[in-house]
Image: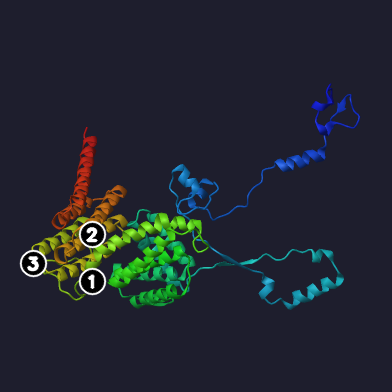
Amino acid sequence: MAVKSTDDTKRPISTLSSGSTGDLTVEANSGNDQSLAAQRKKRHAPKVRTGCKTCKRRRVKCDERKPTCYQCSRRGIACLGYDPVQTWIFELPGATLEVDQSQSSAQDATESTGSDDAKKQPLPAPTILGPVVPFRSAAEARSYQYFEQKTGPFLSTATAYPKPLLNAMVGSAWQCAASRNLLIALAITDEFRSNNIDYLPLEGGIVSTASSTKYYATAIGLMARERYPVSDLLIASILAWIYDIGHRRTEAARIHLNSALEIADSNTTRPDSDECPPQDDDLIKTVIKPALDGNQNFHKASSVLASVGTDDAVSHPSLKLPEKFSSVAEAVQSCEKCFELLRAGQIPPTKAASFGRDWLQSVRRYGAQGAVSPLQRWALYVLWAALGIFIETMYLGLAGIEAQIRWNYIIGQTERIYDAERFSGFTDVLALVIKVLGWSCEHRQPITRAKRLMQRIQRERSLDKGSDSP
């Protein structure tokens, strides 16, 4: 095709030839066109499988920021967390396996003839041995699965970000031996107490309550001598605190909790380092530190029930507990009887504390049925902590700002539970919390918060009834 031009300066440089002032012929260069097409071709990034579950489902690129990635936070959708990272081991068959003599002789004959086709044969495909799992036995893997499905969801329910905290606990168990041993110890304890058993025969041996103690001791030794990342160390401290509280070791629990809080506070004031990369720093600030603060409030509220009295203390004859409760309302009625006897002075704090521990055992077995959600079970734990605050206020002289802080924590937990799940029996829990609060707190702020929540519930119920009527 001929192109006519009156000004050479306006013509593309690639079309000009030296000394040309007339018609120019633009010839298509197939080689140049192919190179331009190759440059314009979209470059595909290598596919990765470490993004969050939400971005995987939406098939978008994830920046893998924790606890919430940028894509999910920008769109205001829930980030479902990350799958545990699996490492695979590959082994070439010729590297470790002995070669058959017939194959070896045939190979020598081929090499002696100098066949090029034989020399160009590709290497055999690698044999996949399987993912590297950190568990030494099937019993450990079973305990990990129990924690992931039952124990972990309940423990993380008490925090502001339950799912990210559960993912952090489970993920830490895959890379931190201390967290893994503590996770297994908690799973064994929770399963045995919930089902009222002392041992469990499995294929690899018998798992007993002593097994949880061994795992706990191993974890404490690892925390003392190993150097773990800050996030893993804090997760291990939370798990150790939970284990100590469940075994009535309040002083050891307090040490673990205070040490973790000190590490978390110091980490927020120092710049990023290799021990705490930016993603771990975000996890500590947004998930782990609030969880530690909540644990501290719950520890103060419930430690009196774990430390007062002995295990063989006999409760009041009228406070007979069933093997397991049938509903939340039944559990609340049983706890209310104990409160009324304690308030009237008919039972001492030691027997009330003994009853509280037995009552908590019935709550655990009730939760093991599967018909109760983690939030319903946690609401009963909050009620248990409220009874502990009452005992400490009436008999141990708890007063002032410390009592107000603990009660604000209890009311805040009830508000969060109601916003998350509105189940049958919640009003019974809240009514008893308000009754205990009125007898043990002089400050009006937590009382006002509790009454406002009750009024809100009643108002919403009346609106629901009005909408149902024709």
Whether 23 is drawn above or below 76: the answer is: above
Callout 2, which amino acid? Glu
Q: Can you identify the residue that label 1 sits on? A: 307
Q: Position of residue 201 (x, y in %)?
A: 37, 76
Find out whether the residues at labels 2 and 1 contact each other: C-beta distance under 8 Å.
no
Q: Secondary structure at mark 1?
A: helix
Q: Position of residue 454 (x, y in %)?
A: 20, 46
3D distance between C-alphas at marks 3 and 1: 21 Å
3D distance between C-alphas at marks 3 and 2: 27 Å
Q: Earlier in the sequence, mark 3 or mark 2?
A: 3
Find out whether the residues at labels 3 and 2 contact each other: C-beta distance under 8 Å.
no
Residue 346, numbered label: 3
Callout 1, which amino acid? Ser
Q: Earlier in the sequence, mark 3 or mark 1?
A: 1
Whether 228 is drawn above or below 69: the answer is: below
Callout 3, which amino acid? Gln
Classify residue 212 by image quadrant: bottom left
